[in-house]
Image (cartoon, grey):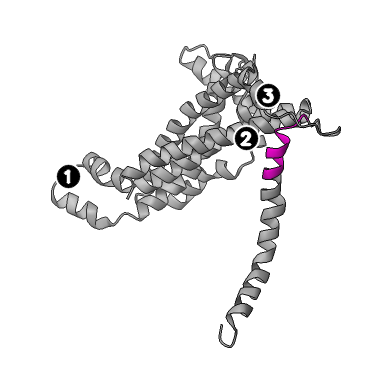
């Protein structure tokens, strides 16, 4: 700024940044640091705080509930990410073409994303109902006896995966649409002159040039899926028989039902480390193919 010394410029920059800095410290940095400290204690939310060292972390290693929740979380991720990526890309490819009512269809596919998890979960819970749900009704029309869905340990997590993918496909679709619109039409014109088929264009032009978008979508989907919680709590509460209990729900149970804040904080930090390591590994392997 004209007429201002370097010292004055730094002073006013600090003044303007102060609200954001205070918000970051109060709502992010201090709670994170506090949870790390609490993870080494036996704090029960109301009583005194006693330092217990690594006891919470050692206890986690022998806790069967923790390992079951971890296994269920990975099962969710393995089912959710391929579904949301494949169908998100297919929707983006379809709605990137010139067609009537394209804006309407894009908005329609995106609607589930802005719908609350409570509404979505309750509707799908009704759809999955084995007695009067629409899914089993339509299956019965073609002679198939539908499963018990959320009441059966073998299908409950599958039901949650399908619901989650249905809600998030619109979000992934929008990201892929952005990536598709950044691809220059000259590539397709050149491929057309060379006589390339549409499938060939997809494999040789679209998918390679979408690599940065695919990389970003994978990272975001992976982090979100590790934090799956709302739909599980509403649709199954972790049941039946713990078949849908996930890590975040386990953390919630120990923090606000059993009042073991120290143990819940230790689980939170283990979850953070898992997400951090998986993301680093993913970045290491995928960044080689991303330009």
Q: CA distance from mark 2 to mark 1?
A: 51 Å
Q: For mark 2, does the 10 Å Cα neighbourhood hold few (<14), some (14 to 19), or many (20 or more) residues?
A: some
* 285 relative to 205, above or below: above
Q: Position of residue 286 (x, y in %)?
A: 36, 40
Q: Image point 55% across, 30% down: which residue?
A: 163
- Local SS, label 3: loop
Q: CA distance from mark 2 to mark 3?
A: 23 Å
Q: Position of residue 9 (x, y in %)?
A: 60, 77
Give the residue number, with chain letter if any, for mark 2: 269
Q: Nearer the viewer, mark 2 or mark 3?
A: 2
Mark with earlier residue (2, 1): 1
* 242 relative to 253, above or below: above
Q: Nearer the viewer, residue 280 or 71?
A: 280
Q: Position of residue 171 (x, y in %)?
A: 50, 44
Mark with earlier residue (2, 3): 3
Q: Which image quarter: residue 135?
A: top right
Q: Nearer the viewer, residue 32 or 86?
A: 32
Query: In the visual, does 189 lie left or right of 92?
Result: left
Q: CA distance from mark 3 to mark 1?
A: 51 Å
Give the residue number, with chain letter if any, for mark 3: 237
Range of residues picked out in magenta: 32-42
Q: Quadrant of the N terminus?
A: bottom right
Q: Is there CB contact under 8 Å for labels 2 and 3?
A: no
Q: Is residue 36 magenta?
A: yes
Q: Is residue 84 magenta?
A: no
Give the residue number, with chain letter if any, for mark 1: 196
């Amino acid at each position: 700024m004209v007429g201002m010394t370097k010292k004055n410029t730094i002073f006013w920059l600090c003044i303007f940044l102060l609200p954001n800095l205070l918000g970051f410290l109060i709502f992010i940095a201090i709670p994170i640091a506090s949870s790390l400290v609490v993870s080494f204690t036996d704090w029960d939310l109301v009583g005194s705080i006693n330092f217990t060292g690594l006891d919470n972390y050692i206890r986690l290693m022998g806790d069967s509930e923790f390992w079951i929740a971890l296994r269920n979380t990975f099962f969710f991720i393995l089912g959710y990410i391929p579904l949301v990526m494949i169908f998100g890309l297919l929707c983006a490819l379809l709605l990137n073409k010139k067609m009537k009512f394209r804006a309407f269809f894009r908005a329609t596919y995106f609607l589930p994303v802005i719908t609350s998890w409570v509404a979505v979960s309750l509707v799908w819970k009704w759809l999955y109902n084995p007695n009067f749900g629409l899914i089993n009704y339509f299956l019965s029309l073609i002679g198939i006896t539908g499963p018990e869905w959320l009441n059966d340990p073998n299908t409950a997590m599958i039901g949650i995966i399908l619901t989650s993918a249905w809600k998030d496909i619109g979000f992934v679709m929008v990201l892929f649409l952005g990536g598709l619109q950044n691809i220059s039409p000259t590539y397709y014109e050149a491929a057309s002159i060379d006589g390339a088929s549409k499938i060939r264009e997809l494999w040789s032009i679209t998918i390679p040039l979408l690599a940065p978008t695919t990389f970003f979508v994978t990272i975001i989907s992976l982090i979100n899926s590790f934090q799956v919680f709302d739909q599980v709590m509403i649709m199954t509460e972790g049941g039946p028989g713990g078949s849908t209990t996930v890590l975040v729900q386990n953390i919630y149970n120990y923090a606000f039902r059993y009042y073991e804040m120290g143990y819940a904080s230790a689980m939170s930090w283990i979850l953070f480390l898992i997400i951090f390591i998986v993301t680093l590994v993913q970045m290491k392997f995928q960044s080689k193919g991303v330009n």
